[in-house]
Each structure stands twice: as C-alpha cells, then as structure tokens.
Image (tube, helix red, strand yellow):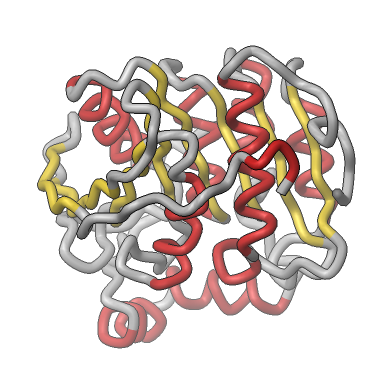
Amino acid sequence: MTDALYRSAPLSAPERRRLTTSDGIDLDTALLRGGTDRTTAVVLANGFTGTWRSPGTRSIAERLLPIGDVMTFDFRGHRDSGGLCTVGNLEVHDLEAVCAHLRGLGYTSVASVGFSMGAAVAVRHAAMFGGVGAVVAVSGPSMWYYRGSRRMRLLHFGVEQAFGRWFLRVARRVRVIDTGWDPVPPDPTQAAPDLAAPLLVVHGDADSYFPIEHAERLYAAAPEPKDLWIEPGMGHAERAMTPERAERMALWLARRMGGRSGGEDGERGT
C-alpha cells in the first residue's frame, strides 16, 4: 500500500455495547480498538442481512484501524438488535446513535463507511445529521425500488412477500417491516447535494445488484470534495472487498480527514 499507511496493530476482542436510538431501538454494537489515533473513529455500516460478527466485516475493520478505532454494529431488525428492519429508511437513526456514542467517548472526528444498504444509510445520515468527517459509500443504490437486476428482484420478493420475510427471519435472523414506507424518504441521490463531508463512491463493474450507473448518478449529485472509484472485476459490497481495497479506502480516509488529497483520490478504477 502506498504511503505505508497499513501496518499490523495489536488487536483486542471487540467490546460489546448496547446503544439506544432516538426512536427507542436497542442496538447490538462492537468497538474494535487498536488504532494509533484515539481521536478518530470509523463506523462500519453493513449491507442488508450483514452483521458485525462476519469475518468479512472484521477483516475490513482491521484494515481501517490505522485511521482509528472502528465501531461496527447490527442495524435494527438484524440478529440481536431490536426492532424491525426498514431497509434503509429509519436506519439513519441507528447510524446516528453510533456516531453520537463515539463522540461521547471523546472521538473528535468520526467517519462512516457503508456497504449496499449501509451505503445509502451513510449518505442520507451525513446529509440529515452532519457530524461526520468523511463518508465512503460502497456498492450503494442511487434510487429506491430498483428492480433492474435479478438479485434485486429477489430482494424485493424477500421484503415484500410474507414467505420471503419468513425466510429472512429464519435463515438470516433479519426481521423486516411488513408495510411500505409512508412517506417515502429522499433517496441517496436526492440527499447527496446536502453533504458537507468528503464523499468516496466505490462500485464494482461486476456488481450483480446495482450497475455502475448508480455510482455515477450518486457521484454526480454530490458536491465537492468527492471521488469515484469504478473497480474492475469487483462484485457487491462486503464480500467483494479485498485487503488491498480496504487499505486504499483507509488511505483515502486519512487524506480526506486530514485535509489532504492527491495521488489516487480522484481516479476511477484504481
């Protein structure tokens, strides 16, 4: 990795914490310490059905530790967190609860890194609440109700049909609302112009959920400073992350949160 940002750090077991959102939902979270900068923290927001317990999420978190300590959590309706998943709507309150908790612990700079549904939440959260030093949106949608891929049609079946919700609850330990949004919240592209933090959009050209047009649409809507990486051969979200990609994200965060840019910041497909 350039600039030799990544290096091994002594790791301790994740510190389990229960947090409560502003709308009363109990969240299961884990703080991973080992960063050398105790003023900066990074929050990882998983995709739909994702969990902080997954080896993939842990691997990404470890690669971000040179930036600071990393907090991961399960969105509402996922595993041991309370409530019902709203598939990207009320989850902004989950992310705000985690960011506020970190600020309460004394971290003066907090960044959010979201994947798929978590990417949409990270963009909307930063636009609505502010308070983050940088946002990374990986494999995120630019609009709601997209059904242009087979996987997204299956996902809609899972959240809209009783059998699909039963399967998610039994097989993936995810509990989903059985009603539609009312009102429909602004989508990530509509929220992006209100961002006051640097944005990095990362998307694979082999994503089987959302084509790269989603990344390009989101990037075009956001104000500067912003960067877009279209990654050759990359699939979708956490499972498509490699150590090298996570390390480059860490380098981008270090530069942007430190007020610096250059090198690969503005490059596509690096």
Between residues 42 and 178, which one lies in front from this camera angle?
42
Identified at 25% across, 46% down, the residue is 31
- Residue 187 visible, this orientation: no
> Residue 156 vs residue 125: left or right?
right
Q: Whole-percent x and y of residue 129?
A: 40, 19
**Quarter of image, res 151:** bottom right
Query: Is 265 rendered above or below residue 195?
Result: below
Q: Whole-percent x and y of residue 5?
A: 61, 40
Query: Is 170 rendered above or below residue 237?
Result: below
Q: Whole-percent x and y of residue 54?
A: 37, 71
Between residues 92 and 2, which one lies in front from this camera angle?
2
**Quarter of image, res 263:** top right
**Quarter of image, res 97:** top left
Identified at 72% across, 69% down, the residue is 235
- How many numbered marks does the figure carry? 0
Identified at 33% across, 45% down, the residue is 34
- Residue 27 visible, this orientation: yes
Identified at 19% across, 20% down, the residue is 104
> Residue 164 vs residue 27: left or right?
right
Query: Is 60 rendered above or below residue 21?
Result: below
> Residue 28 vs residue 182: left or right?
left
Q: Whole-percent x and y of residue 138?
A: 63, 50
> Residue 25 vs residue 95: left or right?
left
